[in-house]
Amino acid sequence: MSSKDTLVSLLSRTELFKGLAIEDLEACIPSFRETKFKKGQALFVRGERATGLYLVAEGRVRLAISKEDGRELSFRHATPGELLGEIAALDGGVRSADATALTAVTTYRLDKEDFRKLWTARPVLSERLISFLCGRLRDTSGQLESIALHPMHVRLARFFLIAIGDRKPVPGKRLPLDLGMSQGELALLLGASRPKINEALGRLEEIGAIGRTLDRIFCDPLKLAEVDGSHA
């Protein structure tokens, strides 16, 4: 697959660009520039002025907020086909979080001025921007609700369901799930301690919603959905 085809495929998977006609996607391609980062390298840091957004092509990026006392709250991992840094690129403000490469990462960067030219020249992209921002607001509201109202095993069940996506289970078998992160990283992402994550994993395992080996988790989507729906 050519780099052009790869970029079109990646863009069509993003919440912002998906649904656009192929000619609109192809018109965006020349504005993107490939940018690579080493494991542990910062894509950007909280408080700096935004100069563009990134589309992840390979690897995993952690978005987190660091406190003065050294504590860190991870709130999202960006994987291939996801955008990051788009909000600050839209309003020209400062970065609201740190973005750090958890693995070697390849991205496509879109400078904010080029981004502005694209949505100005293509009204269909402006329409997608409105839908995109509304979706982000709903996601944030849902995340706050989950943290404030639901116990850890319910939040964990919801996390697994999102990670599974639309994969269909084989009758009588659980779906294997490769998280791509350590248990400590999972705890940071869900705003919990490792003991709390262990306790929640144990509870899900007891009811048959998941099974565990040393390096993988096997999920029963139906039982996870029951946990997510019960908020027990």
Image: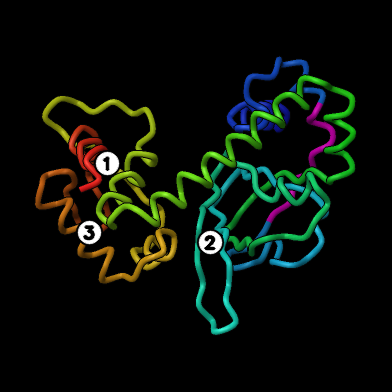
Span of residues in magenta: 28-36
Q: Which mark is residue 200?
A: 3
Q: Is residue 176 magenta?
A: no
Q: Hey, which quadrant is residue 69 in on the image?
A: bottom right
Q: Position of residue 224 (x, y in %)?
A: 23, 40
Q: Amino acid at mark 1?
A: Asp
Q: Amino acid at mark 3?
A: Ala
Q: Earlier in the sequence, mark 2 or mark 3?
A: 2
**Residue lying at the far bottom of the rendered structure:** 69
Q: Position of residue 110 (x, y in %)?
A: 79, 43
Q: Amino acid at mark 2?
A: Leu
**Residue 31 in the figure: left or right of residue 130:** right
State the residue in front, 104 or 118. Answer: 118
Q: Position of residue 133 (x, y in %)?
A: 66, 37
Label 1 sits on a secondary structure element that is helix
Q: Residue at x 46, y 52 (%)?
A: 144
Q: Is residue 32 magenta?
A: yes
Distance from Cα at disc 1 to Cα at disc 3: 13 Å
Q: Position of residue 88 (x, y in %)?
A: 75, 51
Q: Residues at badges 1 and 3 in contact (C-beta under 8 Å)?
A: no
Q: Residue at x 63, y 25 (%)?
A: 18
Distance from Cα at disc 2 to Cα at disc 1: 29 Å
User: Of discs 2 and 1, which sits in the foreground?
Assistant: 1
Label 2 sits on a secondary structure element that is loop
Q: Earlier in the sequence, mark 2 or mark 1?
A: 2
**Residue 13 in the figure: left or right of residue 231:** right
Question: Label 2, on which residue?
Answer: 102
State the residue in front, 94 or 142. Answer: 142
Answer few, some or many: residues within 10 Å of disc 3's Cα (few below 14, many 20 plus, some between 14 and 19): some
Question: Label 1, on which residue?
Answer: 228
Q: Hey, which quadrant is residue 12 in on the image?
A: top right
